[in-house]
């Protein structure tokens, strides 16, 4: 059985990520890309679906772990009755192959250790052929190959498991490595683990040194930035939503999705987080990926893409995996790729403004023709119902947030035209369309009885996406409709101090799925932002601190949180949660709120 989600830490090489738990087991690793098949899939099944364990043989009395300061090198320290030992786990960035290093070192006394390696390619489904080498194994099946370097004698077992026993004491150090390679090529020679650790240490230290953020909660902000970098596919600049697939929003439920792709919606939030922290190169790479991914006919723009811009992300289920804590199904791919979500057009235009107005020097690599084509297409479809920001799989509806983001697209077009990026001739027409959208949302998306905007036209349901109305500038924070919406969400969607996206246990079948979900961390950060905009700084800071306390022992957050069970839920680590942490920390660190917290050129129509 896998560990609790919060018991995992990540290592990564800016191409893929592995998850390591407190027992010393690597239970998830997709190679060579973050969305590739996983040779270690115990996270979604059991040990027989693939894992790599290095841990003491006997009873462990205490486990502590930490990242080396400002790096992605994880050190886990096991204490036993005979001594203590550390296992240092890391993946060197910018090497030719994706590889994991594990260095075992004594911290006093003598500790008997065990290693267990179970490789099952394609998410725990395929057992490879294993061939012994002078210093380890080569494991090959179909297109995948792994080379294990081991400093100790290996023993093969009948169940295609490789084990080893060894001890560490004094100055003894044992270094293991596992390297992915295409099976049609020769297995690469192993690299020296100590040299690789130094390389990894310098890479991350140099990267963090570029951070310009000096506001509050800096350690958590830096850890969140490192996490975002780890979720970046460096060859293209794409940022994935999470490192995993199918970690459930409810234990035993079926709200299990594949998040190892890049969503257009993430664009502005990610750009804000990178920009306020000084990472203009990453911001430029992300914009470059975004431009390439959406190139072509605006009618064909998708809400998400693969890390290299792939458009076909067909969803299927893996019946051989039981799911995390029996939360089935396990899904690969994501059928939401075919949905209509109007808000992404607003996010694309907003990201163009965010990038354009970044004070750091950078080339503006947006194509005006592409932006104009997007605006022309949006004008023809903004009145249509869509699937909304939460990608509901029920009927399409006129979601209020979607219409607001359509308003954002034309609002930001006016900003770009005023700044000379887009032509000025269409400005009056864009102003007219913007006003039409604004009037419709205020008429049909606001419920006077509730004194709140609602999830969709004609509904009485609340939705946490409505917390974006003030930050994007649709209405000023002092507008009573904003205060009413915030109050309604606090009363109707807050559970034990955290915000749910929407109610999933009502008679209105919004998403077409059974069961409930946990509190959503990103929207909880959004509530803190709104409280700050309303001048309620103490409440905002209290909420922010409460959210930060949910970070696990190494500073990581998943998508959701179950306040009753007091455990993290959903895919892990979640980029949106960490982006929201960075942006809220920056907002709370500003001397004044209001325009500095919004991305709008002005309020209203």
Image (spheres, rainbow, N blue to C red):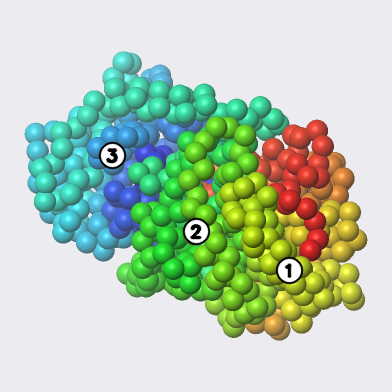
Q: Residue at x 59, y 83 (%)?
A: 395
Residue 538, above or below 325: above
N-terminal of the pair, mark 3 or mark 2, is 3
Residue at numbered disc 1:
432
Counting from the top left corner in percent of width and height, residue 487 is at: 85, 61
Residue at numbered disc 3:
99
- Crowding at label 3, few (<14), some or many (≥20) Cα neighbours within 10 Å? many
Tell me if 322 is positioned left or right of 359 in this view.
Answer: left
Residue at numbered disc 2:
369
Residue 288, above or below 487: above
Which element type, helix, strand or loop, lies under badge 1? helix
Which element type, helix, strand or loop, lies under badge 3? strand
Residue 191, above or below 299: above
How far apart are the alpha carbons under marks 1 and 2? Answer: 21 Å
Number of the front mark, 3 or 1:
1
Among the 4 quarters of the image, the one containing residue 167: top left
Whether residue 42 appears in this view of the structure is no
Tell me if 172 is positioned left or right of 352 in this view.
Answer: left
Q: Are marks 1 and 2 in contact (CB under 8 Å)?
A: no
- Crowding at label 1, few (<14), some or many (≥20) Cα neighbours within 10 Å? some
Counting from the top left corner in percent of width and height, residue 340 is at: 54, 73
Whether residue 103 appears in this view of the structure is yes
Front residue of this view, candidates 501 and 287: 287
How far apart are the alpha carbons under marks 3 and 1? Answer: 55 Å
N-terminal of the pair, mark 3 or mark 1, is 3
Q: Residue at x 37, y 71 (%)?
A: 314
Front residue of this view, candidates 25 and 309: 309
Q: Quadrant of the C terminus?
A: bottom right
How far apart are the alpha carbons under marks 3 and 2? Answer: 42 Å
């Amino acid at each position: 059985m896998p560990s609790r989600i919060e018991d995992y830490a990540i290592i990564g090489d800016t191409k893929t990520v592995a998850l390591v738990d407190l027992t010393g087991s690597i239970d998830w690793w997709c190679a060579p890309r973050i969305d590739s098949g996983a040779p270690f899939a115990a996270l979604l099944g059991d040990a027989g679906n693939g894992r790599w364990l290095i841990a003491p043989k006997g009873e462990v009395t205490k486990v502590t772990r930490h990242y080396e300061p400002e790096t992605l090198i994880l050190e886990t320290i096991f204490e036993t009755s005979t001594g203590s030992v550390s296992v240092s786990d890391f993946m060197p960035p910018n090497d030719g192959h994706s590889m994991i290093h594990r260095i075992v070192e004594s911290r006093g006394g003598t500790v008997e250790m065990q290693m267990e390696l179970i490789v099952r390619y394609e998410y725990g489904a395929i057992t490879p052929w294993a061939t012994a080498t002078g210093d380890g194994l080569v494991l090959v099946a179909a297109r995948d190959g792994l080379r294990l370097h081991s400093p100790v004698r290996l023993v093969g077992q009948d169940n295609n498991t490789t084990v080893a026993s060894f001890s560490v004491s004094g100055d003894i150090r044992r270094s293991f490595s596992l390297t992915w390679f295409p099976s049609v090529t020769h297995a690469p020679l192993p690299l020296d683990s100590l040299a690789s650790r130094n390389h990894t240490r310098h890479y991350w230290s140099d990267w963090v040194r570029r951070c310009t953020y000096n506001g509050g909660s800096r350690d958590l902000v830096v850890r969140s930035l490192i996490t975002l970098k780890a979720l970046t596919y460096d060859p293209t600049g794409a940022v994935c939503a999470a490192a995993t697939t199918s970690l459930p929003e409810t234990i035993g439920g079926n709200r299990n999705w594949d998040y190892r792709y890049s969503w257009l919606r993430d664009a502005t939030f990610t750009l804000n987080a990178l920009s306020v922290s000084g990472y203009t190169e990453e911001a430029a790479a992300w914009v470059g990926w975004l431009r390439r991914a959406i190139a072509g006919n605006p009618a064909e723009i998708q809400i998400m893409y693969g890390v290299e811009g792939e458009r076909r992300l067909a969803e299927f289920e893996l019946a051989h995996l039981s799911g995390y804590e029996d939360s089935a199904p396990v899904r690969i791919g994501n059928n939401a790729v075919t949905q209509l979500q109007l808000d992404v057009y607003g996010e694309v235009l907003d990201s163009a403004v965010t990038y354009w107005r970044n004070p750091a020097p950078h080339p503006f690599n947006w194509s005006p023709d592409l932006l104009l084509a997007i605006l022309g297409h949006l004008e023809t479809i903004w009145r249509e119902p869509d699937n909304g920001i939460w990608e509901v799989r029920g009927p399409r509806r006129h979601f209020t947030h979607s219409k607001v983001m359509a308003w954002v697209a034309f609002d930001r077009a006016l900003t770009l035209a005023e700044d000379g990026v887009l032509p000025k001739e269409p400005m009056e027409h864009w102003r007219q369309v913007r006003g039409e959208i604004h009037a419709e949302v205020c008429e049909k998306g606001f419920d006077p009885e509730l004194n709140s905007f609602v999830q969709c036209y004609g509904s009485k349901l609340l939705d946490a996406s409505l917390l974006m109305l003030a930050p994007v500038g649709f209405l000023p924070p002092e507008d009573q409709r904003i205060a009413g919406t915030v109050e309604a969400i606090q009363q109707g969607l807050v559970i034990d101090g955290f915000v749910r996206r929407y109610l999933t246990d009502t008679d209105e079948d919004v998403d077409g799925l059974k069961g409930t979900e946990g509190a959503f961390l990103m929207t909880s950060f959004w509530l803190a932002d709104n409280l700050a905009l309303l001048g309620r700084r103490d409440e905002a800071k209290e909420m922010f601190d409460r959210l930060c306390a949910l970070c696990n022992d190494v500073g990581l957050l998943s998508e959701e949180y179950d306040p009753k069970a007091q455990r993290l839920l959903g895919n892990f680590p979640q980029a949106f949660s960490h982006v929201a942490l960075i942006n809220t920390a920056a907002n709370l660190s500003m001397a004044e709120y209001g325009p500095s917290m919004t991305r709008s050129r002005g309020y209203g129509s």
